[in-house]
Amino acid sequence: MPHESRLTGELRTLLHAQRTAALGTTGDDGAAFVSMVPFALEPALGCLVIHVSGLAAHTRNLQARPRVSLLVMQPEVPGEPVHALPRVTLEGEALIQAPDSASWHACRAAYLARFPEAEFMTQLGDFCFVAVHITQARHVAGFGAARDVGEEEVKRVFSPAAPA
């Protein structure tokens, strides 16, 4: 049975505890564009799932340039140093899921498990599910505790519990 390191456990906890990310895309003019997106984790597909409107700038950006970055971080705590906030920057490829495909249904199920109140939005024609396949990450577990994380480790922490 493989042992899970403390830092891997902390990364798992961070990704499962937080429900929003800052999504970075690139506009037609090459400018960075950052927006807030709710996200879910789909361990069977090994991806992070977002549900976005075709009317949003970030959706048009990721359709044209699918390389994206997401920042997930612990909220600020009054009286605690902000430089030590646990966070992870995830880099990957965004792929819009074909409606009614097996992967679309898997993404929808993962998203609604986390955001059941968004069920009505899945019926809106301009919204789509996007699977973000993470290729690398930079994890900051606290002040002076930063490391690069590979694709396979990120996929492992998408599962809610450490392997037994």
Image (cartoon, rainbow, N blue to C red):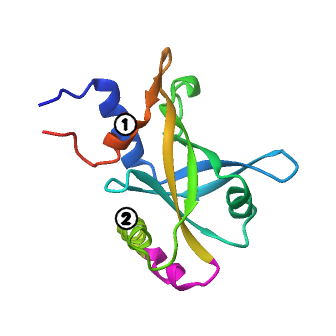
- Relative to the observer, which residue lies in front, 14 or 2? 2
Give the answer, above or below, for where 154 lies relative to 66. Answer: above
Using the image, tell me which numbered label, if any, was put on residue 152. Answer: 1
Q: Where is residue 18 in the image (x, y as percent from the top left)?
A: 44, 48
Whole-angstrom CA distance, mark 1 to mark 2, is 20 Å
Please rate how many residues cluster around mark 2, counting C-alpha atoms within 10 Å: few if below 14, some from 14 to 19, many from 20.
Answer: many
Q: What element carries label 1?
A: helix
Quadrant containing the N terminus in the rendered view:
top left
Kind of residue indicated by mark 2: Ala
Q: Would residue 37 be found to the left or right of residue 64 on screen? A: left
Toward the top, the furthest residue is 144
Q: Which of marks 1 and 2 is in front?
A: 1
Q: Which secondary structure dominates the residues rendered in magenta?
A: helix
Which of the two labelled residues, at mark 1 and mark 2, occupies the earlier sequence position? 2
Kind of residue indicated by mark 1: Glu
Q: Residue at x 50, y 18 (%)?
A: 143
Quadrant containing the C terminus in the rendered view:
top left
Please rate how many residues cluster around mark 1, counting C-alpha atoms within 10 Å: few if below 14, some from 14 to 19, many from 20.
Answer: few
Residue 77 visible to an observer of this rendering: no
- Relative to the observer, which residue lies in front, 159 or 92? 92
Residue under label 2 = 110
Q: Residue at x 57, y 49 (%)?
A: 93
Q: Would residue 163 be found to the left or right of residue 77 on screen? A: left
Give the answer, above or below, for where 94 lies relative to 102. Answer: above
Q: Which residue is drawn at 37% across and 65% down?
A: 110
- The range drawn in magenta is 117-126
Q: Residue at x 51, y 41 (%)?
A: 75
